[in-house]
Image: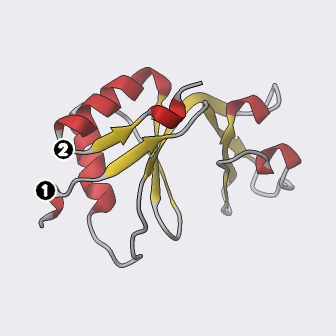
Amino acid sequence: MSESNRQFELTVLKGSFAIVRLAPDSPLPLWATEGDFVSITRTSDELSVVCPADRVPNGTVAETGWRVLKVNGVFALSEVGVLATLSASLAGAEVSLFVISTFETDYLLVNEKQLDDAIAALRATGHRIDQSSALP
């Protein structure tokens, strides 16, 4: 099956998330390590943290109001086209995207104001979205 015809199942994770930028030499704050979904990346330019928005202290440089869609399944690191297929669906609907990849899968972060548009765009291109875990 070509990448353009691939269909994936995604799950919307519960909660609102923040994307945080800290100085590259910042120590890792404890609040950045708490929660069911956390991503931490240190480069020579920044310490970037994605975590539940309610964990971020006031005064911290952060963009809040992000929702997470998990691509269900385990994908080999050599697999081609997973993100290309999903991001093309979102780009066609003018939904901006922040991506986190792990050893096993990918996570798509979209602004919560665009979540409904993102879900509609993904469904329109044949992907299945499970929102049941996103409900309070």
* Mark 2 vs mark 1, CA separation in Å: 8 Å
In the picture of the structure, the residue carrying the numbered disc 1 is: 5
In the drawing, does residue 119 fall left or right of residue 37?
left
In the picture of the structure, the residue carrying the numbered disc 2 is: 126
Residue 52: quadrant of the picture? top right
Residue shown at 47%/33% (left/top)? Answer: 132
In the drawing, does residue 57 fall left or right of residue 38?
right
Which three-letter amino acid code belongs to the residue tagged 2?
Gly
Residue 44: quadrant of the picture? bottom right
Query: Where, quadrant-wise, is the C terminus in this rendering?
Result: top right
Q: Position of residue 56 (x, y in %)?
A: 77, 33
Q: Residues within 10 Å of mark 2 (few under 14, many from 20)?
A: some
Q: Position of residue 10 (x, y in %)?
A: 38, 47
Say if residue 97 shows up in the picture.
yes
Instruction: Kindly give the residue lying farthest to the bottom in the view shown.
Output: 78
Residue shown at 53%/39% (left/top)? Answer: 13
Which three-letter amino acid code belongs to the residue tagged 1?
Asn
Q: Position of residue 46 (x, y in %)?
A: 68, 53
Q: Position of residue 22 (x, y in %)?
A: 74, 46
Q: Is residue 69 above or below residue 112?
A: below
